[in-house]
Image (cartoon, rainbow, N blue to C red):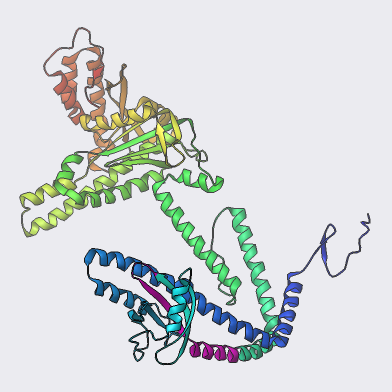
Amino acid sequence: MKTGKRHLKFFQYVGDTPIVPTKLKIIIFFVAMLLLSTFSTNLVAIMLSQRKTIQLSNIVLVDKLTELYNVANSQKQIEAYSQDTQTSIDSIAQSAKNGFAKDEKNSVALGVNPDGSLLFFATPNEELKWERFTDKDCIEMMENSETHEGSVSFISPDGDEYFGVYKYHPDWLTYIIRANRRSDTNRAMYQVLWITVVLVLIMSAFFILMGTKILDGLLSNINKFSTQLYKMQQDKKLNLIDISESPNDDITYLAANFNSLSSTITNLLQIFQKFVPENVVRKAHEEQFIRLEGSQRELTILFSDIKSFTYRTEVLGNDIIGLLNVHYDSVIRKVSENNGIIGSIIGDAILASYGIEEHVETNKSYDAIKTAWEITAVTSELRKKMSDRRAVLEKERPLTESEERVYQAVMLDVGVGIDGGNVFYGNIGSSKRMANTVIGDNVNSASRLEGLTRIYKVPVIVSSYIMEETLSNNEAASRYKFYEIDTVQVKGKTEGVKIYFPLDKECSLEEWKFEYLDEKFKIFECGLKAYYDGDWKTARAEFKKSGLDVAKVFLERIGMKSSPEDWSGIWTMTTK
């Protein structure tokens, strides 16, 4: 279908709109610049000279004079407080002297009083010394000015002509002047003129001989960089642009700046990831936004706490931070390796959630129990290292009382409680400050189960929810055996719940070997059944026979008593 418009073969078209090649634009620009540099040399020289003069005037007026005037204000306030006028004047002069540029060898800064005397005088030229301001016409001009500020020209006591700017300071009752010697400015103008001639000759040759090569290199860079940027956009991931074989031009400079910005953002993301759960960081990167939102989720909650932490803090003081970091480095790694998300670190305790990552198709309770035993193992390994270190020291001498206390403090032991179910998971707070959190009865329950590990002397205690979900996985069912520990009514609850100890058949820790404990726990379970049934005499016998630490809890609880008449088998806890 004809559009009625003639298309030129040289151009590509989008509809009827021609796409002008970048190469053509640059060639036209190069030719125009070459002609301009050839036919306007004198004009450029004049413009550069004028620009140099304007630049010097602007430097004096805006930067130097304003800065000096502000220093005078500050020193007047200091002088009013210290009553040391001369020191303040000397400070103004020194500040003025520090403000001269390298090419302002004969420039001056001075404070001229109406009578011609000088409040201060500063110059980088050590041979230049003025005792008074001798140009009375200049003083009269400044006195008669309505604004008491503006441009000024004067003849120095040495007979040289100066030009600059001034401003009257009402507190010091003086005219602050910043000026350059005119002959220096003329010399700079001649230098600019010669430089211009040389540059025109060099640039003409450069554009003719090297223009095409630079053009090709520039266009190849633009194409290479844009391709890499497009890929980053598609992948939604910041990377560095490859500039290893790029020429040293402004396009490469822009790419280098982008790389610097990319590195900065990547570093910030890495820091962000250390304080925020990984799934939140990933969602923020994908959606470029974080909302205050949440939903009901079925999650598994793991709560791990260091036992006797108050005592350890009292003994170690600030050194507890280093010990905690060693402990957390291993614990957090184990949580991440088993698909857990660290929700919060509260002093000596860690709260982790499993089942948050929707793309991870594993048994969340199985993952949590694996983590619990791995945390127990790494903590035991840390204690072994401390014991080995003690053995080495004791070969030289016995430990002192204070060293013994430190040794006991660094022998970390942890308890882990695990529960699961429906909880609220999401972001709460405000638009200015928010936190990613998990809220629910099962979160509190995990914390209370961890507290029970101290009572029952086992490293891990889980709820019936965790046991049932774990046993639904064939691999987990063959690895863990769950022993019922008790039926308790924890603080804040109105009903009793059964609690379980999941023994890892693959555990390498000597004190928790399955072959060593399985028979003992079977005897314990017989005692527990008698305990539930109210046959405490049989229960005592079975508990004693088992020889387990957990059985000692029941022996202390029932003593030599018989079960109460209203005995339900539920033990009510009075603490969390």
Q: Where is residue 512? Give x, y as percent.
A: 25, 38
Pick the residue in front: 138 or 399. Answer: 138
Q: Residue at x 45, y 76 (%)?
A: 142
Q: Residue furthest top?
A: 565
Q: Is residue 257 above or below residue 194?
A: above
Expressed as whole percent of the image width and height from the top left, the position of residue 522 reads 26, 26
Asked whether residue 467 is in view, the answer is no
Q: Is residue 274 above or below residue 303?
A: below
Choose top left, top right, bottom left or bottom right for residue 520. Answer: top left
Camera-side residue: 166 or 54?
166
The image quarter in which residue 307 lies: top left
Q: Which portion, as a residue range, is magenta?
A: 169-195
Foreground residue among 29 and 80? 80
Report how many numbered discs are placed on residues in the image: 0
**Residue shown at 92% from the left, 56% from the top:** 3
Is-magenta flag for residue 177?
yes
Quadrant where the N terminus is found in the figure? bottom right
Q: Residue 304, percent across and down?
A: 30, 38
Give the left or right position of residue 412, taking residue 300 as reference.
left
* Rendered view: 227 above or below 109: above
Magenta span includes 107: no
Is residue 416 among what the camera can see? Answer: yes
Question: What residue appears at the point 57 percent right and 77 percent down from the top-left corner?
Answer: 248
Q: From the top left corner, tell me how far across and down residue 446 is, in percent.
A: 33, 31
